[in-house]
Image: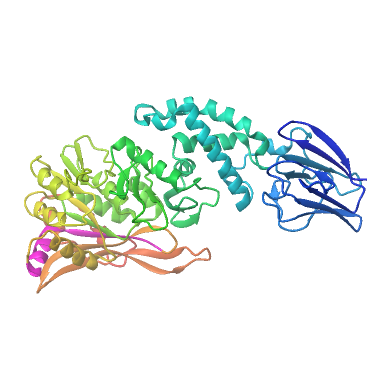
Amino acid sequence: MPNLAIRDQNSGKSQNYEISKDLTTFGKRDGNDIVLERQNISRDHCQIVQINGGYLIRDLESRNGTYVNGQRITSETPLENGTIIQLGDFLIRFKDKDAKPASESPATEAQPPVQESKTPASAAGDDEGRKMVINIKKQIHEQLIKELNLKQMDITKETPEELRAKTEPIVSQLIKQVAGRLPLGLSPEVLAKEVVDEAVGLGALEDLLADEEVDEIMVNNWDTIYVERRGKLQLAEDKYFTDNRQLISVIRRILAPISRRIDESSPMVDARLQDGSRVNAIIPPLAISGPTLTIRKFATDPFTVDDLVNFGSITNKIAKFLTLSVEQRKNILVSGGTGSGKTTLLNVLSNFIPEQERIVTAEDAAELRLMKPHVVSLESKPANIEGLGAITIRDLMKNCLRMRPDRIVVGECRGGEALDMLQAMNTGHDGSLTTLHANTTKDAINRLETLVLMSGMELPSRAIREQIASAINLIVQIARLSDGTRKVTCVSEVLGMEQDDVRLQDIYIFEQTGYDSKGMVIGQYEATGVIPSFVEELQARSIPVDMAMFEYGSEA
């Protein structure tokens, strides 16, 4: 005859119950066969039913649910010898020597296998299980605030290691107090880590930031986090914050070390993490559904040109040509869509600059990591709470010209600074580099013209195009393809004006021919046979140029 070993996790007391009926009921109502008096037990919680010589359990729409071997059941579930049932604070082991042995049985009644589980707390159970975990986290966090005086702690004066050292022992003690209420399948150790991450770290972002395969993190709301891996978007199903308040707290924790703020009067901000990762945050009232956070991660070690060749983003010939162009002080514009790899390519190109030259960079959020000895990095500054003190890229550009730069590198042209950049290129600062958003090299010219108009200077279109034609030497187009890969799709030379238009000629192009069985893009790079106009000048100066780079029809 089947037997139930029932253990109260709060008191530690155990009792045995022999099933002698076809229907055995559980709940805190006195009329049940097994009365369990706890707040997390429903009046009529569940039933064990004998059918055709076997036993199954059914939940009676209980508020806190019925769990079988760590999973909340939604339908009738068969019971096997050794099955573990969890009802609120109670663990029940079903014993029936005549039943089919359970695939997983606990080592002992007192210590079921749940304690050895390494399942993230955020992934424990279904929606109801997640709610239980969130409530437990909130309770622990409230106690932690009282114990540690967390709200008054100045996190800017403590190192992350010091904060964790203070927090971890207290969290471990608090979790011991609620151990009896943890859902089956939830590891106290993992729960402790997540609570500490949320209290003094970046919560659900900690593991994602440490994951080298994750390129970008997109938090749409406290419970919806997407990541980009190898160019593909994925839902991080086991990652979430406890609520929007906790998400805003993490955003402010990111901003605190760099003296940035976010609130209703200033509800959006650009910033960066200590590792250089780019951060954008926007909160209500601008973000209607709740706080939104986007993090563009950067590799610990900056990519080199060899890395781009190995990735298939460029070829050896194109890399050789771009190296020559940078060394010979050609002004280069990197064009591409959002997330196409413009900044990465700009960083690679910047590292072709000779070491003896002075480089000044101007960026909204400092992302470039130039491995050069003579680099001055400038970063724009938003307005203060009174709306004063803003330093724009245009302001930085004007200051750059007073710093005796050999090269000027602008992280991205997105406004009136485009005019300042063109003027610098046209007044002796050859070899300058920048990026902008555009889908083709032709679109890049049109986009640049539009940005110049944003400077407030009422210049005729032809005058602007003449500035562009005389300033820019090369446009490098980069794109993120449908399979998630990033490739340089076109390298074009700016030849000057033809009537009222800027004239371009392609030097290298990427020809897509189809897809393979895995959905990956198939194609090849080709040289158009065009020889850049500045090659003749280089040869006249006895600078060696490998003309094989430009042979028509050859694979680039």
Q: Is residue 71 inside the magenta stretch?
A: no
In the picture, which quadrant includes the C terminus? bottom left
For this view, does 182 lie left or right of residue 158? Answer: right
Q: Which residue lies furthest to the bottom in this view?
A: 499
The percent position of residue 229, horizontal first and vertical second, equals 46, 52
Q: Give the range drawn in magenta.
A: 460-481
Residue 473, above or below 357 = below
The percent position of residue 33, horizontal first and vertical second, equals 85, 47
Residue 410, above or below 530 = above
Residue 431 can be seen in this image: no
The percent position of residue 428, horizontal first and vertical second, equals 7, 49
The percent position of residue 547, horizontal first and vertical second, equals 23, 58
**Colour pattern of the rendering:** rainbow
Q: Nearest the camera: 232 or 117?
A: 117
In the picture, which quadrant includes the N terminus? top right
Q: Is residue 479 inside the magenta stretch?
A: yes
Q: Nearest the camera: 330 or 412?
A: 412
Q: Give the quadrant of residue 477.
A: bottom left
